[in-house]
Image (spheres, rainbow, N blue to C red):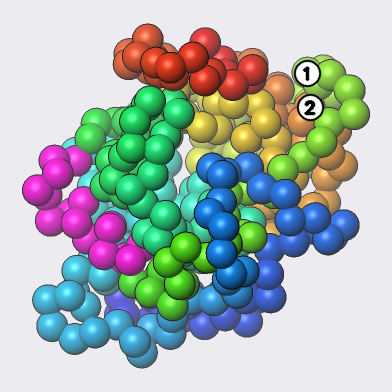
Amino acid sequence: MKKLILSALLVMAAVGGCVGSQGPDGSHSRLSQTEPAGIDAVFNHPSPDSIPGGQRGEQIRLGYQLVVHTQEFASSYVGNRLTCANCHLDAGLDPNSASYVGLSRVYPEYRARIGRVVTLAERINECFERSLNGKAIPQDSHKLQAIVAYIEWLSKDVQEGSRMAWRGIPRLQPTRLPDIANGNTVFTARCAFCHGADGQGTMAAPPVWGPHSYNRGAEMARLSVAASFIKSNMPRTRGWALSDQDAYDVAAYINSQPRPDFDGKGSDWPKGEKPADAPY
């Protein structure tokens, strides 16, 4: 049954997600790290039929389960009600929401927030500590290794050193300062049905503020990241429905609400590379 679920998800993404990552205006600007020079890769992910047999195949399938059903498979490392797939939509296959496809090809990579080169496993643990408001998975854990294996499998057809136009999230260019009051209005009209009028989530979507949401150290706590994600992906299955400014306003409203702090924030950006929209 788990294999059938994974196969169905990959087939859906193959039909709807392999044509590239540009928005309606044709832009390929992304919120991501600097991309390497090289050939332009084509967004594509492997067929589920290519999952190898034996222990490696089981490891990849476990990685998928950890990404999609994080609350069930990694409960001891999660401190809120989110899953990895809440940000990396369609189990990391959506090219407009920080897709996992090709990701393993760029790690190890320098992270300005950490101030040093990090491995893919370390980057995954950043998400557990910040986006999931939890704690790092031990480096020798079979669960962490399974998530890495899943991402490596999704990346196997991307040539190392190639440019991935889909990496990150399509970037927005706001025309004015965000209007939190308008963000409240847009949230009520377009977002509350799934995320709840109080932002605490429903069966359809996760909480976007409060004690069970991402903490202040998460990427999504940055206005530019949240706005870009909202623009290209929300409302779910109807991305690009909001204007750029409405997306910024909603992001500002959401991120003005209370959420958990991040104890390790004092060590972030040790080399003075802090972005202007960092919330601390």
Give residue 133's position: percent from left, percent from top: 35, 29
Instruction: Tell me whether the residue at label 2 lies in contact with that at label 1, contact meaning CB atoms closer than 8 angstroms.
Output: yes
**Label located before the other in sequence (2 or 1):** 1
Q: Main secondary structure of the magenta part?
A: helix
Q: Is residue 169 above or below residue 237?
A: above
Furthest residue toward front: 37
Q: Position of residue 240 (x, y in %)?
A: 79, 53
Q: In the rendered structure, which segment of residues is drawn in magenta?
A: 137-152
Q: Is residue 11 above or below residue 172?
A: below
Occupied quadrant, residue 257: top right
Q: For residue 199, what is the image quadrant?
A: top right
What mark, if any, has residue 180 been given in the picture? 1
Q: Nearer the viewer, residue 138 or 70?
A: 138
**Is disc 1 placed on a helix, strand or loop?**
helix
Closer to us: 8 or 150: 150
Percent across and percent down for residue 83 are: 40, 47
Amino acid carrying label 2: it is Asp
User: Is 161 one of the magenta-colored residues?
Assistant: no
Residue at left offset 35%, top offset 14%: 267
Count of marks placed on residues? 2
